[in-house]
Image (cartoon, coloured by chain):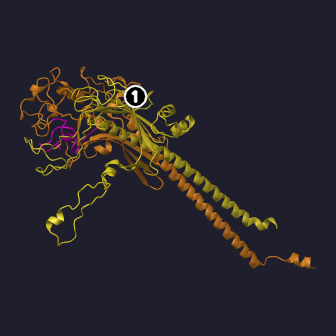
Chain colours: A yellow, B orange
Amino acid sequence: MSPRHGAVLIVVAGLAAVIAAMALAFLARMRADADDSAVLVREVQARLMLAAALQYVNESGRLGHGEEAFGWRDVRSGLPGPRDLFGRKLYVGDDLTGIGGAFPAVGGVARCPVQRLIRPPYAIRQDLVPNPIALDPGRSWAELVNHTVPTPQRSSDVYADFAAGDRRPVGGASGQAWFRVRREDIDTFLITCGSGVTLAFRDFAEADAQGFAAAFGSKAAFDHLRAHERLLHARVRWSPAVAGNAHMHYREQGSFVLNPFATPNLPIATADDQPNSRSMMGGFAFIMVLREPPPVW
Amino acid sequence: MAATDASRTGFTLIELLIAVSLGMVLCLTAYAGVRSSAQAVTVTTRMSLENALLRDGVLAALDDLDTWGSLDHPADAALRPLRGAGSPFAPLSLDGLPVDPDQARQDSWFNGDPNHGNSQDGGDFALLGTAAEPGRSWRHVLLQRVASQLGYYALIDYAPANMIFARRDETGAPDPEFFDCWAASPGAFYSPNHADNTNPRDFVGITRGTMYTVSAEPAFVADGVHRRYYRFWDYPVTGTVPFSQDAFRRAGQRLALLPLRAAHWPALSVTTRRFILGYRRWQTGTVVLADPLTGAQSKLFVATTTTTLRGARRMRPGIGEPGDPP
């Protein structure tokens, strides 16, 4: 066969090779874009954890200790909290400084891997309209407006299941993010947020000491996972002061009639609804995202 | 002479034309494919570049919101326009009083009628504390000092969440700066949006339809941005509050990114804003990407929880608060 006979084939094959090369470059660029986007996803994930950690600090000053407590600095005495109704410590540590071994004592660390549960404990059913208005005009007014089932509905008909929930993680939702909280002082906390699978351990040695070495295999594996995480450090100071608990609290000038919670201030034509921004758990005097990782976290 | 006959075998002109035509169709089709692929790669590259710019814009906005660097540069003293008296990064002095009161002490609570901070409808609340009474002066001193030394945004940032924004001066008289709109001469702090007289003068009450912000924009600084409010329920805007209508849009900090950008490159605009409005504290970034070739614009809005003004001040030694432990 003379070379001339293959000319068209060569030209077409060459052009096809060019197309293939461009397709390869396209795929490589898309892959690089995806990798770059992952950086932003990790950043956002870490910031979501910061919001979660702030809520954790707020709530754990009063909840989660077996009985209700009165904040990280008890507003009744100024002493370190959390303390119970009678002022007894709900942490193990010094009475005046709060310094102790484990969280919630000063110096302690709470490690919080975060994952979506199939059904959290005490979850209510996500049924927007459990009592739809009947379409039967023959029903009485009382039948039309009265609820036939109580609301909200429990997520399980069996109370024990409702209380226990289903703590298995939603598929694909585990190992995404975590936060840990170090109580630096009575009301100052160092929050570290991460987007990844290291379960809020500071390093492999800590994981090993707590019996989680097998989860990572080796220090090198842990360090490799850590290298692909975004860590966000923030120092915050909790305040027992709460906000927004008085807006439209009184029905009208000079009156001490209280409005029901979450209802409009009816006597005023221009009144907006209440914002419901009451923070029963306290607030934050400051939030300070740190540029450099602190030596101890 | 078969060989001779065979050597004469060849294309007829019609066969040649058809073969050449088919070959050209094949080549042209392949070329069209290459050209389309090249165009697709070009468009993809452009879109990839735009996506990268959007991502970088978001990260730049978040970084600025974390550090407040566009308002007070951490390294370059020449880029700190808000260090002057009355500005948010000025030194703060509370004459030895603590920034954070001990909420266990009753003298840190508001003792008065939260609805009528500048009247005596409910009695003489000056008897319960003034700026001059040791041990009962914290609230009255903090309000005046922070408002005058750092401005209103800083005052709300520093104040505990349960603050009632009313004070008594050293003589026991209500401070006219915090007179609300029901007074004959309203003070500078309260917006007329505090329109009904049933709201306590707390964080929720003072931010109703009203914005307080931090800005280094020259027009706003000249307008006294740090000691004034901006109304959002005021239509039309009155002459007394000229910036209200545009305050949100114009008061943000524009980050100088890609200063050497070629004219045909996509233009990235990043603006960060810190404001208190509508019962909430906002720290936001707006990222806008404009393509000069197509005219298309993309916009991302980010609101995040991050460093507060007090947190930003604590990053900067020498302006009124002890440095954080390392």
Above or below: residue B95 compared with residue A210:
above
Q: Quadrant of the N terminus of chain A?
A: bottom right
Residue B33 appears left or right of A13: left
Of all residues shown, which one is farthest toward the right? B1
Residue at the disc numbered 1: B78
The quadrant in which residue B295 appears is bottom left
Depth check, front residue: B26 or B201: B201
Q: Main secondary structure of the magenta part?
A: loop
- On whether residue B205 falls in the magenta region, the answer is yes
Residue B1 spot, x, y in % from top left: 93, 79
Above or below: residue A127 compared with residue B101:
below
Above or below: residue B9 compared with residue B108:
below
Q: Residue at x 47, y 50 (%)?
A: A172
Look at the image and give the residue range highlighted in magenta: B187-216
Depth check, front residue: B109 or B14: B109
Above or below: residue B305 compared with residue B320:
below
Q: Quadrant of the C terminus of chain A?
A: top left
Depth check, front residue: A238 or A25: A238
Depth check, front residue: A35 or B94: A35
Residue A129 spot, x, y in % from top left: 27, 60
Circle 1: element type: helix
The quadrant in which residue A150 appears is bottom left
Tell me the chain of label 1.
B
Q: Amino acid at mark 1?
A: Ala
Residue B74 appears left or right of A260: right
